[in-house]
Amino acid sequence: MVFQALSIARNTLIESLRQPIFFVLVMLSGVLQAFNTASTGFSMGYTTTAEVSGDDKLLLDIGMGTIFVIGALLAGFQATAVISREIVDKTVLTVVSKPVGRPTIILGKYLGVAGAIAMAVIVMITFLLFGIRHEVMTTAADIVDQPVVLFSVGTVAIAVLLAAFGNFFYGWSFPQVAVSAMFVLVPLGYAATLTISKDWELQPIGTDFKPQVFRACIALGIAVMVLTSIATAASTRLGQVMTIVVCAGVFVLGLLSNFMLGRLAYQNEPIATIRSAEAEAARFDGFDSRGARYQLELVTFPEVTLEPGDSIWYGSNPTGFALAVPDFEPFEGDISDPRTRNDPDLPPAIVVRDADGTTLVLEQIGMTAVPVSRAPVEGDHLFLQPTEHNAVAFAAWAVLPNMHYFWLLDAVTQNRLIPDGHLARIAIYGVLQSLAFLCVAVILFQRRDVG
């Protein structure tokens, strides 16, 4: 099965690269990235210490959006070209009639299409990185980054000339050779650009390299692979237009899933955000013992007036997802009464001990401590009740690919580090989503009449 799938994948990869629309969309991405450097100077952003700031924030935003949209179009076009069209033309019958399982065909087709689109995404990401190195042309007085122009245009020109030469003299497929050559030459051209400053002076290769931007682009590439699996599933039953519509629909719904489903899956309202948190004594650092106290400084005044004795929950997500405090019975009584606080039958709870404007003191009370997963930290949100869960909304939210997980633009522009662990979790999420849609593709193709 493995060798059969790899053989199908190889033929599908070559067939995908030979599609004229494939070359056209890759080149369109490069042209749009070039135009972005001259047309995104209107964000009026402040200069910060982030890898991109000011007008370059808009450049990165539009550039990543360009890759996202063109990647979705490529997925729709290529999947239908190698699956839907072959079903309509009945050319897939020659493979099905052999001792090759239909799941093997789907797997091979997906690997071939995904390989071709991965090559295109790498080229498109490199075009974006060229644009980030060049930066936005805010005024007519800005100097053009000549190394960027030379190596970007030069590598593309060499690839196109090589493809034209091979097509004229040897009959090679022009789109296949052009994209394959760009897949090699364009990243090499970018690497060479990094070693040369705008003034044509040698510099360390890491001087202008943006590691956080690169990580955000990797996450974006994983999202395109998920869209490719969706296109593969759709193309087993639908034509080209409808497959593209399905990809676009999932793309849009994935961007709106947090609003439409996420806010329904976890229902809670934060009342304040913690600016700083400190234990009143070293033995209370874990906030997991009876009588432990933590002093909190809030970013702003709470949404509601807090009184001593109010029960409190906290967590890192403003929706109330994955609170650090489990459910407990809300405290009722007078927290200032020693008899109440020393009652051996008092249920465990976390309550407000003192409240003064933006300063709070939380205390663990009861016969035992509430088993918190951690102490409150900076950035946590406070809640007056545990989070309610909607199983139906949560299931729909989990099934629909959440494109926000792959969109790390805010982390880059807000100068937040993208950890390797987070990128690994995104990769695992992308693989699981792709496998799920490939299973759907197998189910849809299993009973499809191809004769």
Image (cartoon, rainbow, N blue to C red):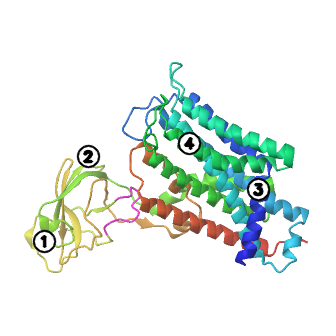
Q: Earlier in the sequence, mark 4 or mark 3?
A: 3
Q: Amino acid at mark 3?
A: Ser
Left or right for 114, reference 87: left
Task: Kindly identify the residue that appears in the image at 32 percent across and 71 percent down.
Answer: 326
Q: Main secondary structure of the magenta part?
A: loop
Give the residue at mark 4. 190
Task: Give the number of the mark in front: 2 or 1.
Answer: 2
Q: Earlier in the sequence, mark 2 or mark 4?
A: 4
Magenta stretch, residue numbers:
316-325
Q: Secondary structure at mark 1?
A: helix
Mark identifier at residue 16: 3
Distance from disc 2 to disc 3, alpha carbons, whole Å, reads 58 Å
Mark identifier at residue 341: 1
Distance from disc 2 to disc 4, alpha carbons, whole Å, reads 49 Å
Task: Give the number of the mark in front: 1 or 3.
Answer: 3
x, y percent for residue 70 = 67, 46
Please state, as top left, top right, bottom left or bottom right, where the N terminus lies in the image: bottom right
Q: Earlier in the sequence, mark 1 or mark 4?
A: 4
Task: Kindly identify the residue that appears in the image at 46 percent across and 32 percent down.
Answer: 201
Q: Amino acid at mark 4?
A: Tyr
Give the residue at mark 2. 301
x, y percent for residue 214 = 50, 49
